[in-house]
Image (cartoon, rainbow, N blue to C red):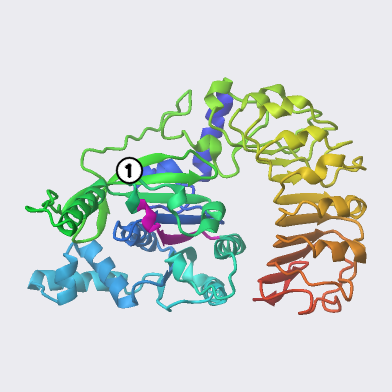
Amino acid sequence: MKKMKQYIKTMREITSSNINNNIGLTTAFKELDFKMSGFKKQELCAIASKSGYGKTALVLSSVIENIQNDNGVLYFSLDLQEKQLLTRIIAMESKIRLPELKRGMLTDNQEELVNSTIDKYTNTKLFIDDTKYPTLKYIKNKIKSKAKNKKNNLQMIVIDNIDLIDNSHNINIAKALKKLAIKFNLPIVVLTPLSNKIENRLDQQPRLSDIKNKSLKIEADLILFIYINDYAQKQIEYNKELKSKLKGENPSYKSTYKDKNIVSSDIIIAKQKHGSRDIKVELELTTDIALFNIPQMIDIPYSNEESPRVSKIFDNIINFKDGYTYKDGLSFKTDDYVNIETLDAYKLKLSKIPNEIYNLKNLKILRIQQNNISSLPKKLLELKSLESLCLCDNNLIKVPKFLIKFKNLSELGICNNKNLKKLPDNFKELKLTSLSIDGKLLNKYIDMICQIKSIEELDIHGGKISKEVFKKLTSLPNLKDLTLKSIKNKRFPKNIPPFKELEFLTIKKSQYFLQYDNNITEDIFSDNIKSIEINTKEKIDV
């Protein structure tokens, strides 16, 4: 109990004395901030809905709140022109109806309100770029330019909408934006429409499968849906009326829906990598202003008292950032941790995985590196939901054959285990997308590893990689991200086949690798390559 109190106290200190207890930038809505801890740095966040449901209105609420707090926001308005976007902001701030603003039909009082709103935002740090169909390179350079000037205090990027980014090279835009969020240490919030197939369902509540951009579902750390039942009913009534007319029914069906000035909307947290999901927050949308508000009946209670258990306000604190950090054990009964999906246990001198961890049945990510673990028991199979297992920097003697029984295991880290000399025969049957492995082990088992065609990310530690190994690595059909750390090579070997799908090449802490005379040429990489970094010095910027 004492440990949890101290944990919450520490979290409060980290997130300052702000009553919202935000970890990231505010969404402008207290309850939503509590549920998702704001828009966090290094995360790709998506807001998705059917057209006209208020994606722009929701993100502009956050933009307005943040620029008022002197935070810089770079807004890529791929859909609306700058003038149209500013009109939306003026409407939200002045509470003047959009039709009146657009037509200039204003009273003297309204004109005064508009002028005071314009004056208020003249010197704010809102940077709007309404370039149509920009390339990823253009977006990256624009962010770099704004972030370089410290006076801009750039804290947030908005892209409205991601589907209008030029993708003539057919790259994974969502993954590239995630990389930019990490590179610039900023949250990137993207807006995206849902597929029209949602119209064919009686239940029009959005699902992850409704997102058009498939890679966005995978790469996004956070996905918010906007669902407005009134709008869904309006569409259903319209469809009934249309079908009735097409059938020639007499009299034809007449819609019973009546337009409302204020409609209730659900903001649904559909995906949250480090927190709870499928949570709804109710807001009200004033339709003719395109402004979200907290419903009058909702009153968020605040208390400075520390609850003996994790209260509703802190129900996601356990999953903060990289998940629950296991230090001196789980503070409560296992039942209190039923929703934990990520668990970290670094540098604890563990010789085995503690038994209580096996009770976390929903655990998807287990990072237990930098310990003294030499073997894995079959009991590990009780974690049936496991997707990612990092055992780097331990004393592993062997990789057990039973890993193949994990149906969802896609990420495995086994590098820096000095006693690990061999891999099991069935290693090639793993369906891995990400693998971290020592260079010596890679050299020995390259043929086996190249049979894992699903590998997208390969992290190689130490050793000298042979030319033959480099050649075989180019045969991995889905390899997009290659990292070489502390290798003894001086350069890439000459006359090897190209890495056709590679997007990111990173060479770290490799003192022997030459900065310029390294045989990195256009022959090695295709047009998919986005960046090459050599010992933190960027060489190619695509």
Residue 365 at what x, y percent from top left?
64, 39
Residue 17 seen: no
Please give the range of residues in magenta.
Answer: 186-198
In the depicted structure, whether residue 506 falls above or below residue 263: below
In the depicted structure, whether residue 65 falls above or below residue 400: below
Q: Residue furthest top?
A: 333
Identify residue for label 1.
203
Residue 342 or residue 24, whichever sits in front: 342
Name which quarter of the figure residue 362 lies in: top right
Residue 188 among those drawn in magenta: yes
Q: Is residue 113 left or right of residue 488?
A: left
The residue under the point 21% across, 42% down is 296
Q: Is residue 258 left or right of residue 433?
A: left
Callout count:
1
The residue under the point 78% across, 30% down is 350
Residue 514 or residue 254, whichever sits in front: 254
In the depicted structure, whether residue 325 falls above or below residue 240: above
The residue under the point 82% across, 61% down is 473
Residue 483 at what x, y percent from top left?
76, 60
